[in-house]
């Protein structure tokens, strides 16, 4: 069975596709085209009806002079729902504390290459640490390779100044910010192991929040 056929065999009615965007009063929706492309690719891969009039539906929920966090969900029949709340950026100089979960991601489970409401691995990993212990929790795959955070992609600054981020075949969501950084040659993909994070300059990020400085918290 092909990977697409395997994905289509999963019951699509029990989960939704998700995209989370940032809206800025002067710029509009950041990386809108990339979000719509990812939504469309996921709909095709998972057997959902293709999204229609996305921008028009998004625009109905934004206004004012402050940034907004905009969450779009879509059912397998193509019905879109949008919610918008104020976006609060991280305080200047904030460094996120990272911990590594014991729960492992299965690298060949193609469902988790799509952003959906099926978030069991991320929820289990996040629950291993309190918010006081970690701002973000990283997952490894069955081979011990670093995959991603529960809501972010991971980036390690290499000696040449370029960012290194785990490859898709380690098992991770192809984040919109990640793709943009790779396309702009500010980042490249390489397999990362936990030892590669020790003492390194780290960042986590997604399209909503951008890049956030991070550090690996000591175990214990």
Image (cartoon, helix red, strand yellow):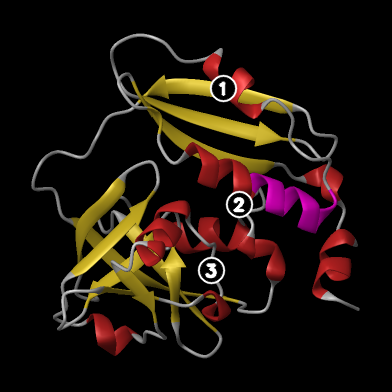
Residue at the location (70% across, 53% down)? 42
Which is the main secondary structure of the residues drawn in magenta? helix
Q: How many marks?
A: 3
Where does residue 181 sit, x and y in percent of width and height? 35, 61
Q: Distance between the residues labelled 3 and 2?
A: 10 Å
Where does residue 177 sit, x and y in percent of width and height? 40, 54
When the figure is inspected, residue 102 is found, relative to residue 111, above or below; the finding is: below
Q: Residues within 10 Å of mark 3 (few under 14, many from 20)?
A: many
Residue at the location (62% across, 77% down)? 106
Q: Mark 1 points at which residue?
A: 58
The quarter of the picture where the N terminus appears is: bottom right
Q: Distance between the residues labelled 3 and 1?
A: 27 Å
Question: Which numbered disc, 2 or 1, marks the residue that appears first in the sequence?
Answer: 1
Question: Which numbered disc, 3 or 2, marks the residue that appears first in the sequence?
Answer: 2
Q: Between residues 86 and 26, which one lies in front from this camera angle?
A: 26
Where does residue 214 sit, x and y in percent of width and height? 20, 62
Question: Which numbered disc, 3 or 1, marks the residue that appears first in the sequence?
Answer: 1
Left or right: 92 with respect to 63? left
Q: Mark 3 points at which residue?
A: 172
Res. 105 image quadrant: bottom right
* SS class, disc 1: helix
* SS class, disc 2: loop
Q: Between residues 30 and 150, which one lies in front from this camera angle?
A: 30
The quarter of the picture where the C terminus appears is: bottom left
Q: Residue furthest front?
A: 184
Q: Mark 2 and mark 3 in contact (Cβ < 8 Å)? A: no
Left or right: 116 with respect to 179? right
* SS class, disc 3: loop
Left or right: 211 with respect to 160? right
Magenta span of residues: 39-47
Q: Name the residue under label 2.
A: 115
Residue 118 highlighted magenta (yes or no): no
């Amino acid at each position: 069975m092909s990977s697409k056929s395997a994905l289509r065999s999963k019951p699509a009615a029990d989960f939704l596709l998700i995209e989370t965007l940032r809206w800025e009063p002067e710029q509009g929706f950041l990386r809108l085209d990339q979000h719509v492309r990812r939504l469309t690719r996921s709909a095709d891969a998972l057997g959902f009806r293709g999204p229609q009039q996305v921008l028009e539906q998004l625009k109905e929920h934004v206004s004012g002079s402050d940034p907004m966090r905009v969450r779009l969900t879509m059912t397998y029949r193509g019905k879109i729902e949008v919610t918008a709340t104020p976006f609060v950026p991280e305080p200047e100089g904030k460094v996120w504390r990272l911990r590594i979960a014991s729960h492992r991601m299965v690298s060949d489970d193609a469902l988790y290459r799509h952003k959906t409401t099926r978030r069991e691995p991320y929820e289990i990993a996040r629950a291993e640490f309190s918010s006081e212990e970690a701002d973000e929790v990283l997952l490894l795959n069955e081979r011990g390779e670093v995959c991603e955070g529960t809501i972010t992609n991971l980036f390690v600054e290499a000696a040449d100044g370029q960012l290194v981020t785990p490859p898709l075949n380690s098992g991770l969501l192809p984040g919109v910010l990640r793709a943009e950084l790779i396309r702009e040659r500010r980042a490249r993909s390489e397999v990362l192991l936990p030892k590669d994070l020790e003492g390194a300059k780290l960042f986590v990020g997604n399209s909503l929040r951008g890049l956030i400085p991070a550090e690996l918290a000591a175990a214990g």
